[in-house]
Image (cartoon, helix red, strand yellow):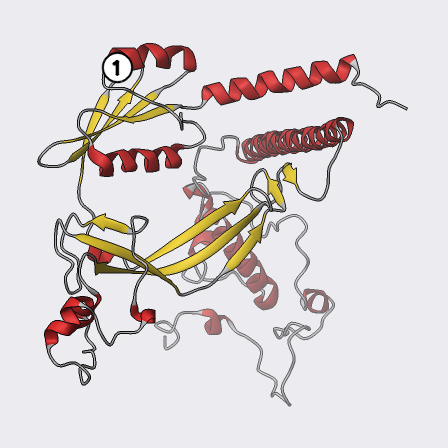
């Protein structure tokens, strides 16, 4: 039974996805990396290394001939969507890198300084095997040794001096390398031999001389296999999985579920923002209403909430004092039976002279204790208030006379 073909809906979705990928790919910057002028082998190798850095958005197999001008490169770059040129050139003084933004510029020119080779001590090698789809992780130490000399001369240049007990003359060591084992011979060749642009630490490593770069593995050694590629930081869409393969319908369902989850999240956030705004408005309205009620209450109590309380009028300050003196004068009349002296109650005497009624009590004031007993023939002595506690026995005082209420200046007369 033959495999069912794709439906029209699936084909349309696949075509639309490809168009979106092409649009996203075209929106990213693309580059051409090439050399101009007499660059030399080292600069050409540098251009190839820069192309590896700019992959996959660069032309890896770009070939620019000497007869091609810069205008020709610009004309070709337009239809291909290239946005940047990286041009390497070399002069007698230094190596330069020009970075051009297409189509209207600007152009940036950089001078490339020589790396200090003495600072390079180690290197990391990562190799991909397309057959097994594995990555080889290797770590090496770097050593530079001169080439072009005999094995005996190399042995002399080392810190450990060779054993020459079996030799008749040192020329035998320098010419033929007699007495050296095969294990001391290093397999140097074109794969690791280069011309040094500067002097490197080590015996015989001079500038413009041929030297060999030797790598010694120091670990760790790892073999890596890619399992999954995920979009985002730990929780994005799975772009690739080596063990799990999903159909187009399953991928669409997963995307729809994620979109619905995001939509609900945004809806909840909007609802929370609306609730917070509503509570804030209600709080402000309640605050304004409370302040308005406080102002109305103050206005009803004081008449004017902004005016200060002036206090009691000055004419009412001493109004209660004459009434108290009248009560005392009336008590004196009832207790003694005579009119009090003017010096005792001056205010009451003044009002009596002015024709005010005497002995008038305030409304609601209770009768003083002892007046009822005096009217019925009882003792005329002043009685103490009933609420005051008495401490022990007290002697009875004689009947008060008119002289007892006179001032001290008149008692002797």
User: Residue 144 occupies which quadrant of the picture?
Assistant: bottom left
x, y (%) of residue 131? 59, 43
Q: Is residue 103 left or right of residue 251?
A: left
x, y (%) of residue 330? 57, 58
Residue drawn where x is 58% and y is 82% of the image:
397
Q: Which element carries disc 1, helix, strand or loop?
A: loop
- Where is 204 relative to 290, above or below? below
x, y (%) of residue 404? 48, 74
Q: Residue furthest right?
A: 1
Residue drawn where x is 50% and y is 53% of the image:
136
- Where is 191 relative to 61, above or below? below
Question: What residue is pinned by disc 1?
Answer: 68
- Where is 317 relative to 38, above or below? below
Q: Is residue 247 left or right of residue 182?
A: right
One can see residue 318 in this view: no
Picture quarter with the N terminus: top right
Name the foreground residue: 305 vs 387: 305
Name the foreground residue: 288 vs 403: 288
One can see residue 209 in this view: yes
Q: Is residue 398 left or right of residue 205?
A: right
Which class describes the residues within 10 Å of circle 1: few (<14), some (14-19), or many (20+)?
few
- Where is 282 relative to 184, above or below? above
x, y (%) of residue 200? 17, 57
Residue drawn where x is 61% and y is 73% of the image:
382
Residue drawn where x is 80% and y is 16% of the image:
7
């Amino acid at each position: 039974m033959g495999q069912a073909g794709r439906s029209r809906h699936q084909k349309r979705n696949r075509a639309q996805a490809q168009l979106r990928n092409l649009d996203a790919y075209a929106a990213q910057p693309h580059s051409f990396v090439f050399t101009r002028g007499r660059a030399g082998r080292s600069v050409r190798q540098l251009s190839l290394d820069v192309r590896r850095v700019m992959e996959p958005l660069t032309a890896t197999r770009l070939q620019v001939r000497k007869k091609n001008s810069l205008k020709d490169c610009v004309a070709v770059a337009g239809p291909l969507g290239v946005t940047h040129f990286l041009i390497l050139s070399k002069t007698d003084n230094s190596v330069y890198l020009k970075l051009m933004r297409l189509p209207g510029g600007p152009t940036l020119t950089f001078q490339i300084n020589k790396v200090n080779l003495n600072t390079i001590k180690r290197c990391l090698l990562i190799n991909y095997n397309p057959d097994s789809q594995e990555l080889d992780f290797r770590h090496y130490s770097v050593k530079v040794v001169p080439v072009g000399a005999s094995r005996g001369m190399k042995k002399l240049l080392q810190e450990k001096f060779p054993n020459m007990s079996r030799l008749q003359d040192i020329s035998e060591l320098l010419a033929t390398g007699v007495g050296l084992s095969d294990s001391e011979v290093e397999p140097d060749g074109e794969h690791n031999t280069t011309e040094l642009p500067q002097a490197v630490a080590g015996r015989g490593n001079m500038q413009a001389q041929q030297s060999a770069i030797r790598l010694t593995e120091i670990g760790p050694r790892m073999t890596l296999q890619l399992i999954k590629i995920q979009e985002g930081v730990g929780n994005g869409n799975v772009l690739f999985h080596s063990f799990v393969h999903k159909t187009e319908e399953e991928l669409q369902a997963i995307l729809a579920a994620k979109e619905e989850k995001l939509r609900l999240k945004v809806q909840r956030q909007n609802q929370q923002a609306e609730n917070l705004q509503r509570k804030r408005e209600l709080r402000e309205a309640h605050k304004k209403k409370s302040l308005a009620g406080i102002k109305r209450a103050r206005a009803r109590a004081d008449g004017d909430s902004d005016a200060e309380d002036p206090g009691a009028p000055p004419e009412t300050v001493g109004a209660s004092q004459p009434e108290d003196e009248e009560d005392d004068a009336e008590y004196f009349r009832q207790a003694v039976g005579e009119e009090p002296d003017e010096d005792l109650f001056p205010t009451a005497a003044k009002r009596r002279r002015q024709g005010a009624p005497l002995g008038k009590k305030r409304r609601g004031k209770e009768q003083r204790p002892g007046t009822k007993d005096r009217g019925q023939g009882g003792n005329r002595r002043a009685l103490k208030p009933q609420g005051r506690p008495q401490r022990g026995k007290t002697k009875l005082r004689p009947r008060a006379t008119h002289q007892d209420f006179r001032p001290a200046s008149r008692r002797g007369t």
